[in-house]
Amino acid sequence: MSPAAAFPPDFVWGVASSSHQVEGAMEVDGGGRSIWDTFASVPGAIRGGDTGAGGVDHRRRWEEDVDLMASLGVGAYRFSIAWPRVQPGGRGALNERGVDFYRSLVDRLLDRGITPVATLYHWDLPDELESDGGWPTRDVALRFAEYAALVGEALGDRVAHWRTINEPWCSAMLGYAAGIHAPGRRSPAAAVAAAHHLLLGHGLAVAALRGVVRAPGAEIGLTVNPYPVVAAGSTPADLDVARRVDGIANRVWLDPVLRGAYPADVVEDWAGLGFADVVHDGDLDVISAPIDALGLNYYRRHHVRHAPEERGGRDWAQWPGTAHVDLVEPDGPHTDGGWAIEPEGLFETLEMVAAYGDTPLYVEECGAAFDEPFDDVQRIDFLRSHITQAHRAREAGVDLRGWFVWTWFDNFEWAEGYAHRFGLVHVDYATYARTPKASARWYAEVMRTGEVG
């Protein structure tokens, strides 16, 4: 009997992490503070009072971590570069001690047959740049381009695969509108300005990397987190809320990058927030510079309805320009983190993005918080169902070229601290001992065979 899902030999199988969530030991390299260090110092900002200062000690244990990946047959490792580690303060020359860590990490990955996929920005903005205004200011996009050029020059002989920014929606909307992520600001106007400047920074970074990456087969792209939006009601008000959320969650990121224009309805929704003032002539030409790949992070759908009271929905702040949003949890199974398990939504997401054109796609984050320590059968079921939907999308003609599990290690999960575990590898937070879970062994077999039964 043939397997339920068989992938071609050149399909990329990998795992993912981010610098602030795993590395720790910023002091080892003389690095600086990020907005997450400052945000975590605010009482009540992070569940349990946790911080990412220690991460899972990857900065000190990177050699054994890479060797563990190799022993399980990991084909690619998507990691991020800590901007404050390599350029404390976000300006000036690179900190060579910090860059040397990434040089060594990349060399060991290559030596073990693992393809490095480097993300320039996974949310750890140098704190000094936030003090000067952060992403709502145009200057940070310019500083990001300078940082991209310097890092690309330093690592571009080794690293061919680059992603500029991870999930700009989260940085803009959770960080500057809702205030539940760093830097913890709550300003709709700041959030929409940050959205544009994150995209501008992406476009400027693409151009910077094109000029310095020398590794054969250079692939430069962006990673977004588009989710299908479901109207949890049929009234005109419910449908309008779904339109608005789809605009902010999906189209305001995809349209300018892949079509060279912001969606007209979102621009209208944001008219009272000063959005038109931050978009300068020529910006969209920069933002829409051709990319080689697009990473998609998928976890669930957005189920939304109209909340009748002005700003009555508990989740309104994530959607600037929309005062009546309420997120609804659907019936059915949920992860231990409380997120609905909706594998069919991944198929919908892949088809939605594929409709924009022929940009190659990668699923660069997909995983779940299950707190089973070692025999994590629920995670295996989650991954099996979602990878099967990825295969279904390929069969339907989507140019999907790879899959990265979120995440390799249990780690610091942002506002949730260390409360929930997403890892294939269990981390004892007292000793930092690593133990592969049942899901790691299961995924190792998927990577070895390219088949999911």
Image (cartoon, rainbow, N blue to C red):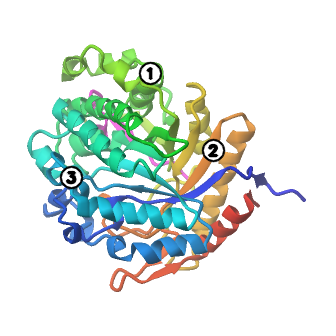
Judged from the image, the secondary structure of the residue bearing numbered disc 2 is strand
Q: Which residue is mark 1?
A: 236
Q: Would you identify the image quadrant in which residue 200 lies?
A: top left
The local crowd at label 1, few if under 14, some if 14 to 19, many if 20 or more residues have their Cα within 10 Å, is: few
Tell me the residue that label 3 is attached to. Answer: 87
Q: Name the mark nearer the viewer: 3 or 2.
A: 3
The residue depicted at 14 percent of the width and 51 percent of the height is: 89
Q: Main secondary structure of the magenta part?
A: loop
Specify the quadrant of the image occupied by residue 153: top left
Where does the image place residue 405, in percent across and percent down from the top left?
54, 58
Q: Is residue 237 left or right of residue 346?
A: left
Which residue occupies the foreground of this view, 342 or 216? Answer: 216
Q: Is residue 82 left or right of residue 433?
A: left
Residue type at numbered disc 3: Gln
Reading the chain from its start, which is encountered first: label 3 or label 2? 3
Q: How many angstroms separate mark 3 from mark 2 (CA)?
A: 32 Å
Say if mark 3 contacts mark 2, CB within 8 Å. Answer: no
Using the numbered discs, state the Cα–Cα distance from disc 1 to disc 3 in whole angstroms: 50 Å
Compared to residue 354, the image places residue 408 above or below, namely: below
Lower position in the chain sequence, tag 1 or tag 2: 1
The amino acid type found where label 1 is placed reads: Pro
